[in-house]
């Protein structure tokens, strides 16, 4: 089973990354490995809405998104982790999602779905926000759902934690670490 994870947080060892690590630990404890991409340190140009992928489903720009596209195409499980900034996913997460326009073209214009392997395709969305308003996770999840749907991930679980702002504060949340670990296990079916 091929599993890929995207860390959309700019904060090194921040709450999002700590939560993602727990989900990954749940997966690795089952004997599987995870390819993790730290989006903040990658060279990903924003989508230019140029139409270059309309006829091929392949983006015309060459950068680190090439690695991500290859990983997405071959993944059975996709984990997306992002802090909530201004009721949305982080810029790092959103830039990667926007570049998935090529997948949208491939699926909806060229009628070529990404086929799931023998395990199918499932996802996990991890969200952490400092505010306590539910609209943050709702808006962030709307973008994530569009991403998952575009890359043919038909079902996903969402974990969101609000009121968590200070670096490392997620470790003091009463259930977050355990919940993330279990979500990792659930993602792979154990």
Image (cartoon, rainbow, N blue to C red):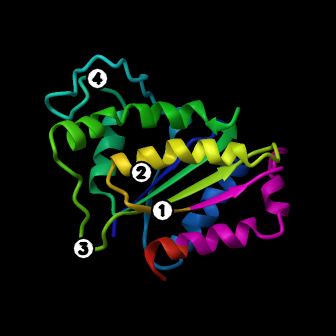
Q: Is residue 49 left or right of residue 189?
A: left
Residue 17 x %, y %? 65, 51
Give 9 or 85, whichever is nearer the viewer.
85
CA distance separating discs 4 and 3: 32 Å
Tag 3, which secondary structure? loop
Confirm or deny contact between disc 1 and disc 3 (CB under 8 A).
no
Confirm or deny contact between disc 4 and disc 3 (CB under 8 A).
no
Q: Name the residue that disc number 4 marks.
A: 61
Give 108 or 14, whichever is nearer the viewer.
108
Q: Is residue 49 visible?
A: yes
* Position above or below: 172 against 57: below
Give the residue drawn at x 81%, y 43%.
131
* Position above or below: 20 against 32: above
Confirm or deny contact between disc 1 and disc 2 (CB under 8 A).
yes
Confirm or deny contact between disc 1 and disc 4 (CB under 8 A).
no
Query: What crowding class fits label 3: few (fewer than 14 Cα within 10 Å), some (14-19), or many (20 or more)?
Result: few
Does the magenta portion include 133?
A: no
Tag 4, which secondary structure? loop
| Span colored in magenta | 158-184
Q: Is residue 28 visible?
A: no
Q: Name the residue that disc number 2 marks.
A: 148
Q: Name the residue that disc number 3 marks.
A: 118
CA distance separating discs 1 and 2: 8 Å
Question: Quarter-wise, where is residue 32 in the image?
Answer: bottom left
């Amino acid at each position: 089973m091929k599993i890929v994870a995207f860390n959309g947080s700019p904060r090194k060892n921040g709450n999002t990354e700590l939560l993602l690590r727990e989900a990954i630990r749940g997966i690795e404890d089952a004997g599987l490995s995870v390819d993790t991409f730290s989006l903040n340190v990658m060279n990903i140009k924003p989508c230019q809405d140029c139409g270059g992928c309309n006829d091929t489903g392949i983006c015309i720009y060459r950068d680190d998104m090439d690695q991500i596209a290859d990983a997405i195409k071959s993944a059975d499980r996709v984990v997306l982790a992002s802090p909530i900034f201004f009721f949305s996913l982080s810029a790092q997460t959103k830039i990667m999602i926007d570049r998935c326009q090529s997948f949208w073209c491939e699926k909806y214009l060229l009628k070529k779905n990404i086929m799931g392997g023998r395990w199918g395709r499932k996802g996990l969305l991890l969200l952490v926000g400092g505010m306590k308003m539910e609209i943050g996770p709702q808006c962030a999840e709307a973008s994530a759902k569009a991403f998952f749907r575009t890359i043919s991930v038909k079902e996903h679980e969402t974990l969101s934690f609000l009121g968590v702002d200070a670096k490392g504060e997620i470790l003091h949340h009463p259930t977050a670490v355990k919940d993330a670990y279990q979500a990792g296990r659930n993602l792979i079916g154990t």
